[in-house]
Image: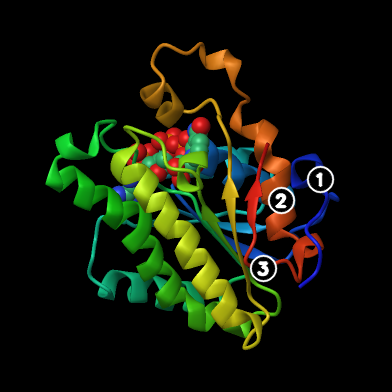
Amino acid sequence: MSKVADSPADYKAPKNLLRDKVILVTGAGSGIGRQAALSFAEYGAEVILSGRNQQKLESCYDEIVASGHKEPALYTVDLHCAEEQPYLELAGTIEQTFGRLDGLLHNASLLGERKAIENQSVSSWLEVQQVNLNGGFLLTKSLLPLLRQTENASVVFTSSSVGRKGRAYWGAYAVSKFATEGLMQVLADELENTSTIRVNSINPGATNTEMRKTAYPAEAPDSNPDPIEIMPAYLYLMGKDSIGVTGQALNAQ
Ligand code: NAP
């Protein structure tokens, strides 16, 4: 395993870093996922936009096309779905359309209820685990055969500081992020000697998005960086300079 860049947050991506790469981004309709899709496209990737809201995905699609980047593909996938079949169908469609997959950014998540564990509703708890953890597992499992066929594919899970150190009232969300780190570590270990796929997690850090505003309603939105400012670490993880880095929990800030 090679050394992680000293500071992925300061990474300077070369212009064509992601040329000829096909990268799927979940939650590409808004926030960090939307920006990651735009940035991956800007650096040359063909991006597969996935999310649960078709209109938001179309708006991201339009911006990528208007910027003169490669035309993205768009697939509506609701990670609330716990059946395997739709994920397998998505994998089949990607294989037929592109014949490859170089990158998978698990970005979509739900915040859920900010309450003490004893006050969490069971339905909200289960929904958060399904979307933040189980959906990512199902999507990864269905796409692994395709990722294996590509030389040096990169899988990136999105974590949080509360997925690395527990904090009161972060409930289901924090637990889902701890489990996501676990999934990342187990998968990275399994794949390290059996494939060229690298698997890492990224903690975006406080970033100016709808989720952050919901979690911290009293905070001034401009006190945190916009999604575009945290993109160097995302580009680092998707591009060739992170080849050999696997099983690592990285920070985007
Ligand atoms: P966001 O703006 O709320 O975006 C979350 C995305 O997840 C949205 O595109 C949302 O789709 C999608 N999503 C939610 N439920 C889904 C479902 N059932 N199926 C498919 N997609 C679904 O939040 P963000 O701040 O950009 O968060 C991006 C990632 O960074 C998350 O994993 C979050 O936990 C993590 N993070 C963020 C911060 C921060 O300060 N912003 C800090 C630490 C970690 P809709 O647009 O349809 O709602």
**What is the crowding at mark 3: few (fewer than 14 residues within 10 Å), some, or many (at least 20)?**
many
Looking at the image, residue 182 lies above or below residue 186: above
Image point (69%, 57%), residue name? 237
Q: Between tags 2 and 3, which lies in front?
A: 3
Colour scheme of this structure image? rainbow
Residue type beneath disc 1:
Tyr
Task: Give the residue drawn at x 41%, y 36%.
Answer: 167
Q: Residue at x 42, y 42 (%)?
A: 166
- Asked whether the beta carbons under mark 1 and mark 2 sit within 8 Å of each other, the answer is yes
Query: In the image, what residue type sits under mark 3?
Result: Thr
Q: CA distance from mark 1 to mark 2?
A: 8 Å
Percent across and percent down for residue 68 are 69, 44
Mark 1 = which residue?
Answer: 11
Position of residue 253 in the picture relative to residue 12 (left or right): left
- Residue indicated by mark 3: 246
Dot 1 lies on which element?
loop
Give the percent coordinates (x, y) of residue 197. 63, 76
Instruction: Classify mark 2: helix, strand or loop.
Output: helix
Label 2 is placed on what type of residue? Leu
Query: In this figure, which residue is indicated by the disc labeled 2?
Result: 235
Q: Residue at x 34, y 74 (%)?
A: 89
Gap between marks 1 and 3 measured at Cα? 17 Å
Q: Is mark 3 within 8 Å of ligand 1?
A: no
Residue 48 visible to the viewer: no
